[in-house]
Image (cartoon, helix red, strand yellow):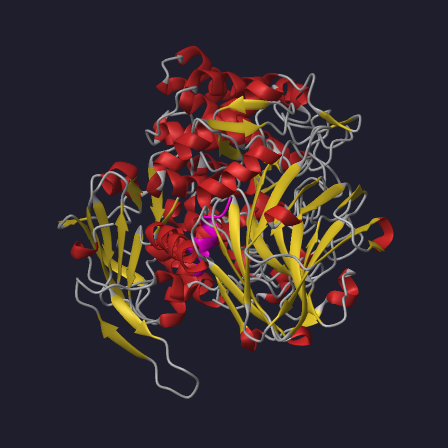
Amino acid sequence: MHRSFIHLLLILICFQGCKTESIGLTSDQDVSLLDHVNPLMGTDSSFELSNGNTYPAIATPWGMNFWTPMTSKMGDGWTYKYDDNKIRGIKQTHQPSPWINDYAAFSLMAVTGELKFQEDERASWFSHKSETVKPNYYKAYLADYDTEIEVTPTERAAHFRFTFPKDSSYILLDGFFKGSMVKIIPEERKIIGYCRNNSGGVPENFHNYFVAEFDKDFELTHTWGDNWALHPNTIENRGEHSGAIVGFNTERGEQVHVKVASSFISPEQAQLNLDREIGSDNFDETLSKATKVWENELSKIQIEDDNVDNIRTFYSCLYRVLLFPRKLHEYDRNNEIVHYSPYNGEVLPGYMFTDNGFWDTFRAVFPFFNLVYPELNSNIMEGLANTYKESGWLPEWASPGHRDCMIGSNSAPIISDAYAKGISIKDRDILLEAMVKNAETSANRPTSNGTIIRSVGREGIDYYNKLGYVPYDVGINENAARTLEYAYADFTIAQMAEKLGDTQLAEKFYVRSLNYKNLFDPVTKWMRGKNKDGSFQSPFNPLKWGDAFTEGNSLHYTWSVFHDINGLIHLMGGKKEFENQLDSVFDMPPDFDNSYYGFTIHEIREMQIMNMGNYAHGNQPIQHMIYLYNYVNSSHKAQEKIRTVLTKLYAPDPDGYCGDEDNGQTSAWYVFSALGFYPVTPGVNEYVIGSPLFKKATINLNNGNTFTIKAPKNSKDNFYINSAKLNGKDYSKTFLKYDSIQNGGELYFSMDSDPNKNWASGEKDIPYSLSLAKNLN
């Protein structure tokens, strides 16, 4: 990070009652970007209403293990709820989503006085006023025990510090349910064991082996077993649910340190991970290393502006983008990269990543990695190839192995976009083979407990390849959504095949990518489910959520023609009709039909309360929609609505999202959009321009170049683009080339409070569409 080339603006965060000021920094001054991150953003959530459905992840970027305070019971997907007032422990977590839930979790907790170890009894009152939450550090005061608990992470380990009163003090290690073992080794001041809890997607031999090293002799050792049965003065227990208790007599202010690590490979590997990542470091040294890692990653983008809340929101969102997918690989004694395969249960060489739903993250998270973190994405591509080699299929939702969740074939755009952006992919031919397999067969898909995992491969592929769509009336739910997503995936396969020189394969899939046209109803001008005999589903209500669509309705999914918006414009009757159809989504009231579900799912409620008509930004299918105004030369409408979403639907607060955050995707929309552009079509080397939020943003690229976006007159009212310059030359296009960014330079926007409808108004100013590029209309 070349700080000497960057001038930063420090936001002085004042205490309550102070006036907020901004101070310009000179180039040799440092700034902590971590101070802007709020890991509690999105934690004020529930099953009924998501303001993010996040938990505070105390972790390093893409770390194998996260740590988080537990306010809920073991097994509850909403492990930390902001409105809760008791902590049950600090757990190692791998949870990507409350809907997917957790695996390989165990926790540490401190109690004093009378021994309490059952999770309800041991829970301690705490307050956010005495809680410190940062990506690299967590601290809470356990009021019932007059004890302070702190933790700082590494990739596969963590360092705890407990500050006790003068009392009988205990540290508990809870191995959780669904199979666990603990063994206390007093002479080594150590607890070892394993936990096997999971929510699916694991082989029979799945274990998470852990080791915890203490810096104080044990004066007491107990364990507990099934049904919370205490076993005094024992050192080992195993069963459905086991745990360990070690006790001390402490003086007031006395600190006990615990170094903890785990491994999916073996107990020996867990110890190796601990020795390598913490070793003899003290707590402050571990914290310093975690701080350095985060500052390095966050500093890839530098913001200069006078709006502290927007800066906080930006870096809080960037933090979320840098969490998933997590690393599942480890380093053996020879420092070789190895991984436990959640697909076949073997320990194999090479990278492995997991905990990701590509239905969400193909849209912006992986395009962001390609832009700013290409080396990371190169490793992820190797991990995808390993998944295919080990399971026979690409992952679509992995946690840690294949999970039956969501629809689509969205591994294809992730791979194709990486290849289009020049990411190093050593197994590119294998990955293309895997992409084509997804598109040609659904035979021999993986199973879980004897049930086919239908999210892997393409459900209804035989119908799709024969008819050009997945029929509405053959018992395959969400059929229209599947058809639209398969068509786009076909486009991305064609793009990669063409770049690899296989023109025959490319042509085949370019033709298939036009299958989206088969669902367009020229009467209603919406996408609509179609029966096997070629007739449209009837009755048809475009406001009906689910049914033919996935977590949305026809008003949301009609726009899922990422690769050929011009073709969709043509179907609707031209640019004006297309623009009117876009307008109608925002102009109507937030009406809905929830009859498919039988109740109002949280995604519907989140749309309803945002007061943006039927625009449902809280869920992924529609998040690119605003940018489509650029395709009809009405970019001023995109600029207005993007600014509304950036400033109204996001905030650096516990209720700071307008729906599920989902593995970084809703955050990645903010990060891209705040910079001023967005990847509407992954697989194409373009971004569509919106409305930059900041006066200045600098992207420090992996190749050593910097790309700067300047909008010095940007303000609350000045969100329209009056004119633009790219590297000093007038620029009137509503798209930005990937190479223009990677080559370094400056994009300058002149902002105004009134729209300039003449800017980017030419036919050649609109972004990519397949039918224009290939003359397929």
Locate residue 147 relative to residue 687 in the image: left or right.
Answer: right
Q: Which residues are magenta?
A: 316-327
Quarter of the image with the C terminus is top left
Q: Is residue 149 above or below residue 321?
A: below
Asked if residue 716 is positioned above or below residue 154 in the image, the reply reads: below
Name the outermost residue toward the bottom. Answer: 17
In magenta segment, residue 628? no
Where is residue 47 drawn, in percent x and y? Answer: 71, 58
Q: Position of residue 12 (x, y in %)?
A: 32, 76
Q: Judge by depth and name the residue closer to the eye, 380 or 169.
A: 169
Residue drawn at the location 45% of the way across and 26% of the way down: 382
Where residue 135 sits in the image (x, y, percent)?
Answer: 47, 58
> Which residue is found at the position 80% from the left and 25% from the top?
450
Residue located 17% across and 62% down the image: 27
- In this rendering, is residue 709 above or below 359? below
Toward the viewer: 642 or 93?
93
Residue 640 visible to the viewer: no
Is residue 59 visible in the rendered image? The answer is yes
529 sits left or right of 352 in the view: right
User: Within the image, what quadrant is residue 245 found in?
Assistant: bottom right
Q: Is residue 167 left or right of residue 565?
A: right
Q: Residue at x 33, y 35 (%)?
A: 685
* Front in this rendered view, residue 368 or 54: 54
Q: In the rendering, at what x and y percent does residue 56 appear?
A: 55, 59
In this picture, residue 288 sits left or right of residue 728: right
